[in-house]
Image (cartoon, rainbow, N blue to C red):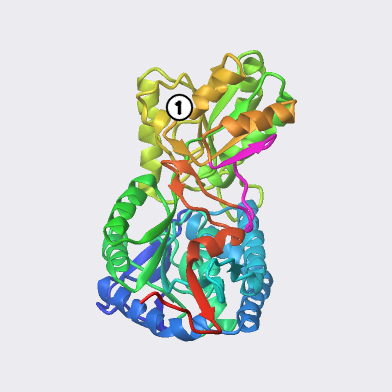
Amino acid sequence: MRHHIGGSWVDAANGRTYDKLNPWTGRVFARVAAGDADDTRAALDAADRAFPAWAESLPMDRQRILLRAADALDRRRDEVRGLLAAETGCGVHFAGVQLDFCVNLLRQAAGLAYAPAGQILPSDLAGTRALAMRRPVGVVAAIAPWNASLVLAGRAVVAPIATGNTVVLKPSEEAPLTGGALWAELLADAGLPDGVLNVVTHAPGEAGAVAETLIADPRVRRISFTGSTVTGRRLAETAGRHLKRAVLQLGGHNPLLVLGDADVGQAVDAAVYGAFVHSGQTCMCARRLIVDRSIAPEFTARFVARAAELPVGDPSDPATVVGPVINEWALSLLERRVREAVDLGARLLTGGLPSGRCFPPTVLTGVPPEAELAFDETFGPVVLLEEADDAEDALRRANASDFGLTAGVITGDPYRGLDLARRLRAGIVHVNDQPVNDEPQMPFGGVKDSGAGRFGIGFAAEEFTEVQWVTARQETRPYPF
């Protein structure tokens, strides 16, 4: 698998490659170009050359390209499902979620070319006509993770392209195909001009050279990043030194509040899905279940029983709910954090030990605040149960986190849920649903340590264009001297 630069598939300038492994079988999935700063600069050159023409391209041309890409992705569903399973361990259900999202993303983005591009402003200078015009910013650096590779790479590139920018995409080393090369192929086949989208891949542990080159280059005017809070903070600090705006979607330690008036069966169904979809490897997953003490015994018994019965194994099997975690490091981290919590006094209700390349659904209660599971995002099928005295106590517990990405509230009174949503310090709140939800047109993003800015087609113009104030006069203006 090679870089995509200036419309061509090219090897890394240094000639190096790395082997990307299938997380389920451990066999080589692909041999991938191991790029560095030289490849990144070549991609930036291509994006910069392509920008003037693409920024002035006709709206109908942009729309046609995006619609053709949507149709092509729709036709390739079975193939892409297989690629997602083999590259990232993504199960059949979540692969379908990703495909639905991306087809809709492309179709909705096709309308951006015809969205209002500015407004007429009133002026107190007689004879002056004033306009606020939105213009594409230039080259966008897009840095995407592996966990929902198709969605998060697509979200990083489609809106900037639709608004007239060019892009250099750095996918994760764990998803160079479905999070990178596949998007370049789809859009190129749909007619995207050379250089509008460029993809540079790198070996594990070598992201720094690519990312730092992207951020430091003066031609890059926006940064789109989805990933961990630790990495996002470093990136934002570097971007700030270069006076560059970054759209950041970072980690989550997402609560699901189950109030005392909730239907327990509905709450259990929501919690099982929210905690264990995609093997718990999404930033939106419910990490903490905060349950009213009055219903906690019944909820806990039913939830733990359901979790223990979830099918674990081959992600290509439609029956599988919990597949492999992405790599050996992730597997060992899960095991270490669960063991630490138990050693500190937590009670393990189910799971807790690896099974081959998988980590089974794991539920703990009584996790002390000093355990890493209690305060840090842990990617995997591990969830914490805690009891609350009432709705106000649940709210207090939920807001105590440094994160603020998404949350859910299960209650028999949706108006009560809306009141709690208003007071939850999270960028996204779902009443009578669990936290794992997204649609292309929605304002996706968090507060506090979960990020800044909003993704979503409806908000792309604010993030990936600049406002230019333009005036015009039909007659000479009188000056005082």
Tell me if residue 434 is in the magenta stretch.
yes
Q: Is residue 169 visible?
A: no
Position of residue 352 measured from the top left corner of the image (x, y, whole percent): 46, 31
Mark 1 lies on a secondary structure that is: loop
* Res 17 quadrant in image: bottom left
Give the position of the C terminus as an image quadrant: bottom left
Check the image and report above or below for 52 versus 18.
Answer: below
Q: Main secondary structure of the magenta part?
A: loop
* Res 431 quadrant in image: top right
Give the position of the N terminus as an image quadrant: bottom left
Point 60% across, 33% down: residue: 422
Disc 1 crowd rating (10 Å Cα; few below 14, some 14-19, many 20+) is: few
Position of residue 462 measured from the top left corner of the image (x, y, whole percent): 52, 61
Check the image and report above or below for 80 versus 283.
Answer: below
Q: Is residue 218 visible?
A: yes
What is the number of callouts on the image?
1
Between 469 and 341, the residue placed more toward the observer is 469
Q: Horizontally, is 311 left or right of 234 in the view?
A: right
Amino acid residing under circle 1: Ala
Point 48% across, 61% down: residue: 87
Tell me if residue 120 is in the magenta stretch.
no
Between 185 and 446, the residue placed more toward the observer is 446
Check the image and report above or below for 321 versus 186.
Answer: above
Check the image and report above or below for 450 versus 145.
Answer: above
Position of residue 41 measured from the top left corner of the image (x, y, whole percent): 30, 76
Magenta-drawn segment: 427-442
Q: Horizontally, is 370 left or right of 29 in the view?
A: left
Q: Which residue is mark 1?
A: 400
Point 49% across, 65% down: residue: 464
